[in-house]
Every structure is written in C-alpha cells, then in structure tokens.
Image (spheres, rainbow, N blue to C red):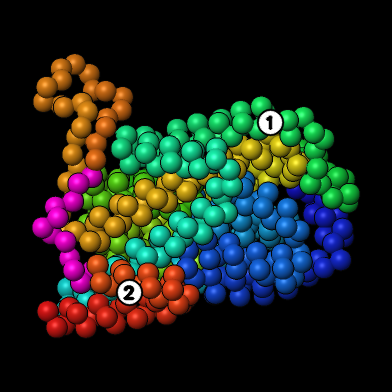
Amino acid sequence: MTKSSSTEIRQQRADAPTFPELVRVFGHIGLMSFGGPAAQIGLMHRIVVDEKRWVPEDRFLHALNYCMLLPGPEAQQLATYIGWLMFGVRGGVVAGLLFVLPGLAVIIGLSAAYALFQDTTWIAGLFFGLKAAVLAIVVEALIRIGKRALKTQVHRIIALTAFLALFLLSVPFPLVVLLAGLAGYIAARSSRAADQPLDGLQDGEKTLARPHLGRSAAGLLFWILVWQAPLLVLWLVLGPGSFTALFTFFSKMALVTFGGAYAVLAYVAQVAVEQYQWLKPGEMLDGLALAETTPGPLVLVLSFVGFLASFRQSMGLDPVLAGILGSVLTAWATFVPSFLWIFAGAPYIERLRGNRLLSGALSAITAAVVGVILNLAVWFALHVLFARVDRLMIWPQMENVAGPPAPFSLSLSVPDWTTLDPAALVISLLAAVMIFRFHQGVGRTLAVCAVVGLALRAAF
C-alpha cells in the first residue's frame, strides 16, 4: 500500500488514531496479551473494534480469516495487518513488533532460569503443575475457536476430517489446508449465495488504490532478504554448525506451519523433539506452560526451544549467551515472515473483501484449524497424563510388507494405562474447574496449579 492510499483509508474513519496513539495502544496490547491466540484475538477485537472503533467488524473478520490461512502466528499477523491498515508499512512493523517484544524478553529470561535450574526439586514441581494446567487451557481454546469457526455442518465435517487425517494418517498439514480450502470454495460456488452481488465493502473503501505489481514484487524481495540476512552472517562468522541448522530449521518451519500457533506447536513437537532430539516431549510441554504465562504470541515457545538447543550445543560460547542467541535467531526466523505475508498479500486481500468464494475457502480453512487444535489437545493429554505413549502401526504392517513405503500410514497413539499420573490428572481437572466453572483467567489458573504442583511434588 502506498502512503497516499494509507492516508486515504484513515481519512475515511472518524475515529482514526494518531501514530503515537497506535504505538501506545499496541504497546498495551503487547503487555496484556496473555492466554494464547484465542484470548489475544479477543483482546484486539475488544480494543480495536469495540472500544476504539478503528476497524469495522466485517473488516476485522476478513483480516482474521486471511491470517488464519497464513503460516505462522495468526495473532501477530493480525496485529501487523491492523497496524498496516492504520499507517501502512510503518504501522504494521510497529504493531507487529510491539505484540512480540515484551513476551520475547520474558521468555528468554524464563528459558535461562529453566536451563540452569530445572534439575532442582522446586522448579520440577512448579513446571509439573503448569504442564498439567496447560491441558485445560488448550481444551478451552479448542472450544472457543470451534464456536466461532464451526457454523455449518460442512465446517464441522471439515474439522473432523482434518483431525482424523492428522491424528491417524499423519497427513502433512499443508495438504490438509489445501483440501479444506478447496472444499470451502466448492461449497461456496455451489451455493445460490455465490451468485448474489458482492457486499461487505463500505462506500469509502471502494476507492482503495489498486496494488502496484512492481512495488509489491520489490517489497517482497526486500522482506525475504531481511528475513534471511542472519543466515548469511552466521555462515560468514561461525560457519556451518548448530546455529545455522537451528535458523534453517525454523525458517523452513515458518513456510510450512499453516494454521497458526497450535499448528506450529504440533509441527515442532514432531520434528524438533522426535527427529532432532533437541529436547524431550515433557520439556516441550514445559515450554508451552512458560509461553502461556507470558504476554505475546503462544508461538514464543519456539524461542524456548531455540534457547535449549543452543544452550546444549553452544559451539564454544558461554551456554547462556549461546541460548540467548539461539532464542533471538529462532524468533527472527519465526516472526519476520509474518511481515512479509501481510505487506505482500494484504493489499490484494483488501480488494477481495466481500468475495463470497474467497470467504468460503477461508472459513473452511479456519474449520480445519479446529481439527488441528483437537489433535494437539489429544497429543498433550496423552503426554501429560501418561509417562509412556506408544505409536501403534495399524497399516501397513511394516514387517510384512515388501517394496516402497506407502504414501500414508494408519497408526494410533496408545498410552500405557499403568503409567497414568494421578497427580497430573487432579491438577488438570482443577484447572478445568477454574476455567470452565468459575471463569478464572489464565494467569490465576496457572499460578494456582503451579503452587499445587509444587506442593504435590514436595509431598511425594
């Protein structure tokens, strides 16, 4: 978007903010955005739509659906999108950074404390309680997002299909997203509503300047160079090693983890834990609990992963310094692409507002994300409540099959019921009662469960 078109949009709203006000408001949002993407999106909606009236309801939801389509953290992308609507690129950069930086500073400090003191009894008990409480928080996020996304029978079928494809068949998430979007497009095209005139555009917004392809391509190239600049520096200064491998992994992750924070966590849990063995499944849950206690995107848990990986493979550096470097590199690889997706795609998405076919595809993708969150909730439940979880191969039985491997396999995660942890079950139920029955906030719930976990570990 050009500077003139950005000004054009702001002049169409009586409640348009000044730039210092934008900085102040998104600084406040960055400090108060606890509780994961569902709570953060709700906070932005309350402030930006209901209180400030900077963005109308339909425009906010249109931006949200686009951000749910993108790889990476949808809440940060939504903040960037709103900032871009207000003041173009500088507004998007400021809003996106303010949403991330407070939480990043906190997660680095907590990661250092975890890496240095996790073997002590008190911190083990503390994270035991946090880990058990996260299960209830993930379930609550599933219900909240599901109520918003699963409005029709088609959406519910898409969500269930996405869950089964991920949980039983281990289908790659990009393929799930592609098929869901195609199903939503076909459903919208077959509906009579698709033949009705487009709506949803306010009169003043129809004059939005058409995006310039040349400027868009130049902006796209610029942000790609900004994104990958650390990789070149790492190669020149340190050569190939753990830092370059870390940055390369999370750069690839940023391209394939569609569906927002919960899809990112599912992908990293599978690859970073099982393939690279940078940390254990229990430590991944500890990192998620840390991220839940800090403001900012839930995907900041990836900086926790980067800290531990670099702390343990420091390449001659001080371990804590190496951990901080790994954490910052992980955040760079994860969050910079969000600016790329918004600044390159938002001008075109804005011109498609009111297009029923696009809205149908986006809403179907949002429904598939509900299936992803359900898959994550089941995975977390198994690893929180049971000390041992096996993966049972149903088809094909590899020892009886000759020739090339099947493109898909049917398998099932099966817990060893004798390893059920009663204390973890009690704390998870306590968190569920606090959230669902007494409507307690995430911060208070985690604090209570951390104390209970600490007490139980000290007693037993």
- Residue at the spot of label 2: 430
**In the image: residue 146, left or right of residue 272:** right
Camera-nearest residue between 365 and 207 = 365
Classify 10 Å Cα crowding around label 2: few (below 14), some (14-19), many (20 and above): some
* Kind of element beneath mark 1: loop
Labelled disc at residue 53? none
- Residue at the spot of label 1: 191
x and y percent of residue 290 in the render? 36, 69
**Is residue 94 rendered magenta in the image?**
no
Classify 10 Å Cα crowding around label 1: few (below 14), some (14-19), many (20 and above): few
- Up-down relation of residue 210 to residue 250 (above or below): above
- Up-down relation of residue 426 to residue 57 (above or below): below
**Kind of residue sitting beneath label 1:** Ser
**In the image: residue 437, left or right of residue 24:** left
- Going 77% across and 38% down the picture, which residue do you hit? 212
The answer to whether residue 233 shows anywhere in this view is: no
Magenta-highlighted residues: 413-424
* Kind of element beneath mark 2: helix
**Is residue 418 rendered magenta in the image?**
yes
